[in-house]
């Protein structure tokens, strides 16, 4: 994928325990998946993100990220944005659930999904969590009291326009912090079999890692979400 000049950045010197999506049909227990993929940071980073060219100078400040756009009211999402919920699921060790997308190489994210017409955002969050991860053992601890939006890059917008049949500028998200009250064996990336699987691997990771592994256009929203939920993390 990368040339000999590829530079891989260490991921905060923390190993990540990866769990694979079950490859069989409904009824497959994730408990039977070997959980032996303990990778060194450099191994994971070589799979997640590589930047061509020489290392950047330590004196060069990072480029600032655009700020997420909050809506002043929760009555309605900003016009032109698809109503959506996001779920920050944490375990007893205050680690955050993240999973790698099947349709976007090396892209990791927290669970999220669209709000059906007339659906309460809290119900939508519980439904999306169950559909994407198989998890129903969770309770809501907190929520971001305003909409957060991100814009789709042009190529993503065009792809989703075909997929959804609607042209959205991006997504307006209502975020919830949830406590996972079950056991890891409950997590199944086949979900509840009502929707097509979206993820291939999952792991419990730190707030810094979830931002590092997210696609660029979601990073500002993730930073704001984790800032709001910081007292609980």
Image: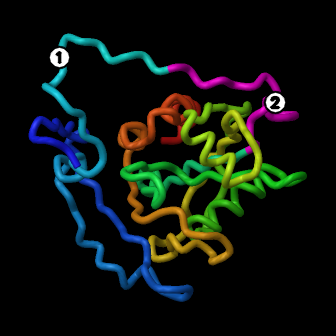
Q: Nearer the viewer, mark 2 or mark 1?
A: 2
Identify the residue at image location x=60%, y=35%: 152
Give the alpha-carbon distance from disc 2 to disc 1, as whole Å: 41 Å
Could you say which is closer to the camera, residue 196 or residue 213? Answer: 196
- The boundaries of the magenta stretch are 66-83
Label 1: how many Cα within 10 Å (few below 14, some 14–19, many 20+) = few
Question: What is the number of the mark on residue 58?
Answer: 1
Res. 230 in view: no
Left or right: 139, with 60 as reference point: right
Where is residue 195? Give x, y as percent. Answer: 65, 70
Q: How many residues crowd around disc 2 within 10 Å: few (fewer than 14), some, or many (20 or more)?
A: few
Q: Residue at x 65, y 58 (%)?
A: 139
Drawn side of residue 101 relative to residue 88, left or right: left
Residue drawn at point x = 79 percent, y = 29 percent: 78
Colour mapping: rainbow
Which residue was labeled with disc 2? Answer: 79
Quarter of image, res 174: top right
Q: Nearer the viewer, residue 7 or 36?
A: 7
């Amino acid at each position: 994928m990368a040339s000999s000049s590829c530079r891989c950045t260490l991921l905060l010197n923390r190993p990540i325990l990866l769990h694979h999506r079950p490859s069989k049909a409904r009824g497959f227990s994730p408990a039977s998946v070997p959980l032996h993929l303990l990778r060194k940071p450099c191994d994971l980073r070589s799979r997640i993100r590589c930047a061509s060219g020489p290392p950047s100078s330590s004196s060069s400040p990072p480029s600032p990220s655009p700020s997420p756009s909050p809506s002043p009211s929760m009555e309605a999402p900003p016009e032109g944005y698809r109503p959506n919920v996001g779920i920050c699921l944490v375990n007893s060790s205050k680690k955050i659930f993240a999973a790698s997308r099947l349709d976007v190489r090396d892209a990791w994210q927290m669970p999220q999904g669209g709000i059906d017409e007339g659906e309460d955002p809290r119900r939508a969050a519980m439904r999306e969590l169950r559909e994407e991860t198989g998890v129903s053992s969770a309770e809501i601890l907190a929520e971001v009291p305003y909409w957060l939006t991100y814009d789709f890059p042009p190529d993503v917008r065009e792809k989703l326009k075909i997929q959804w049949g609607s042209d959205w500028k991006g997504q307006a998200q209502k975020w919830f912090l949830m406590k996972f009250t079950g056991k890891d064996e409950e997590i199944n990336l086949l979900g509840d079999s009502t929707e097509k699987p979206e993820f291939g691997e999952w792991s419990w990771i730190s707030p810094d890692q979830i931002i590092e592994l997210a696609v660029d256009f979601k990073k500002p929203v993730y930073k704001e979400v984790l800032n709001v939920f910081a007292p609980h993390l």
